[in-house]
Amino acid sequence: MAINLKPKVRRLLLDKRQQKRYVFLLMAFVFTILYRMGKWPFASKNIALDPHNLPYSFQDYSGKDEPFFRGCTDTNLYLQDPDYAKMNASFVMLTRNEELGDVLKTMRSIEGHFNQWFGYPYVFLNDRPFTDHFKGQIQAATNATVEFGTINETAWEFPAEVRDSLLFKTALEDQNDRGIMYGNMESYHKMCRFYSGLFYKHPLVSKYEWYWRIEPDVDFFCDISYDPFLEMAKNNKKYGFTVLITELYWTVPNLFRTTKSFIRKTAGLKENLGTLWKLFTFNYNILDTEDEEISRWVNYPSDAKPKLTEKLMVDFLLENRGQLDNEEDLEGIQYLVERARSKMPLMEDSIEGEDYNLCHFWSNFEIARVDLFDNEVYNAYFKYLEESNGFWTERWGDAPIHSIGLGMILDLEDVHYFRDIGYRHSSLEHCPKNAIQGESNSGEFDDGFDFGCGCRCVCPKNEEDIEDNSTPCMDIFFELLQGKEYEKDFPGCYKPSIKDKDVIEEIRRDNFRVIE
Ligand SMILES: Nc1nc2c(ncn2[C@@H]2O[C@H](COP(=O)(O)OP(=O)(O)O)[C@@H](O)[C@H]2O)c(=O)[nH]1
Ligand SMILES: [Mg+2]
């Protein structure tokens, strides 16, 4: 049967110029689809990080921290290298007998993607003894050594005087009433306290130099073809993460206040905070000015110009009273009235001009040195937090505590983003693009990209990468990595300062008639 072409299509076949236009539009359409599918063919190495340009997961980054390997390395050769030395390291998981199914799921994933080649031991911890069934199933899932430990009462339970107090019970009920996630689960509070300050003291953990924390119900999406412990050691890294996100505000309303109080009371700490501190803090002291009053009004960059304009207008009015024409007078008076009406902003959580930005390394994955925590400063920090009762009056998570605690001690360069480790727990995941290698052409794995770093990754389809959606944490992290730093005048703060003189200049340049 003959196809009846619509007049428009017929014209297209006849008109060459028109045809070119349609070909162009078709190509644009195809590239849009390819880009959306993550198969953009012209992606090049070292695209400048620009959140307004491409999602982070489609960009390369360079700077103070890079993946140890881009794509796969030959694991056999790696292991045979005379310089290779297995590290004094272990996996660590706190779990319950009932979670056996999810624990085995995690083990299958990590064994398949990594540990079948490296054979690192496992430590399983529990507040109750593990059953023989649990132990048997776990040991059958790996060729590596497995040790099972029980946590003693002082490491797991809140002190007796806390447990028995009416305040303790009402505090948990109150958190439940206020809808705080896990707020009324005593066991969750205990778990967070244990991971915050006690896991590294357990004898099965403290005998190691390094640990890799894992949890039940985790998926790894890529092969880890090298030894992350060794590479961290070689590159002077102390703490590694895969996900950086914000905490729920109402779980930690007083954590930062308590932390700042600890810093004030610890001699020499404030002056020696690590640069990692900037990843976890907002600085409200952003205006470089001698005018203390203005400084308190200006907390965000966008406050600077309106507030300084107001100041200039009012000063001008007061200095030239009676000599102005009506219009100028009126304008000045309007500013004056506005100033009289407005209230100074109350920065409720700002302490010495600083606030916790809620960012934290998601601690269900950690590869770190044990002595990062078992040291004088961090131990004292945990003790201080414990004495403030925040582990039960609020629902402080171990993740923000690790992050803030390490923020005090570490520099940005001490931390490693394991961008090449594809990871899912709960509903969050990060999965990197593969590097271009033979493996990625086989069709068995995801396609490779010249900006990719993953090794044999198979990422879930149509899932959002937390790397692209973790605002403002990943933005701050990448900015800091690129050296877009903070002013030296404001130690321990992230945001850059704005000079009042520069803003005044800008107002002048805008032809601000009255202050010429
Ligand atoms: N033994 C034991 N392990 C626990 C308890 N509560 C939590 N865990 C473990 O602590 C880790 C974190 O708990 P989870 O419920 O996964 O917290 P989430 O990931 O923050 O939702 C997991 O490895 C759990 O198995 C508990 O009461 N006893
Ligand atoms: Mg969990």
Image (spheres, rainbow, N blue to C red):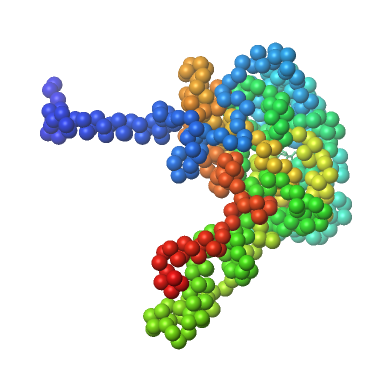
Name the spot of residue 513 as percent of width and height, x first.
41, 71
Residue 314, compared with residue 89, is above or below; it is: below
Quadrant placement of the N terminus:
top left
Q: Horizontally, is 32 left or right of 56 in the view?
A: left
Q: Horizontally, is 293 left or right of 320 in the view?
A: right
Q: How many marks?
A: 0
Residue drawn at point x = 80 percent, y = 60 percent: 167
Q: Within the image, what quadrant is residue 140 found in? A: top right
Residue 117, compared with residue 67, is above or below; it is: above
Q: Horizontally, is 182 left or right of 324 in the view?
A: right
Q: Nearer the viewer, residue 391 or 502?
A: 502
Name the spot of residue 500 as percent of width and height, x first.
55, 63
Q: Nearer the viewer, residue 281 or 141?
A: 281
Residue 501 in sight from this viewpoint:
yes
Q: Nearer the viewer, residue 483 or 260?
A: 483
Residue drawn at point x = 72 percent, y = 54 percent: 255
Q: Nearer the viewer, residue 126 or 314?
A: 314
Quadrant placement of the C terminus:
bottom left
Residue drawn at point x = 81 percent, y = 46 percent: 377
Name the spot of residue 388 as percent of width and height, x first.
80, 56
Residue 345 in sight from this viewpoint:
no
Residue 490, compared with residue 146, is above or below; it is: below
Residue drawn at point x = 45 percent, y = 30 percent: 44
Q: Within the image, what quadrant is residue 233 found in? A: top right
Residue at the limit of the structure toward the bottom, as seen here: 322
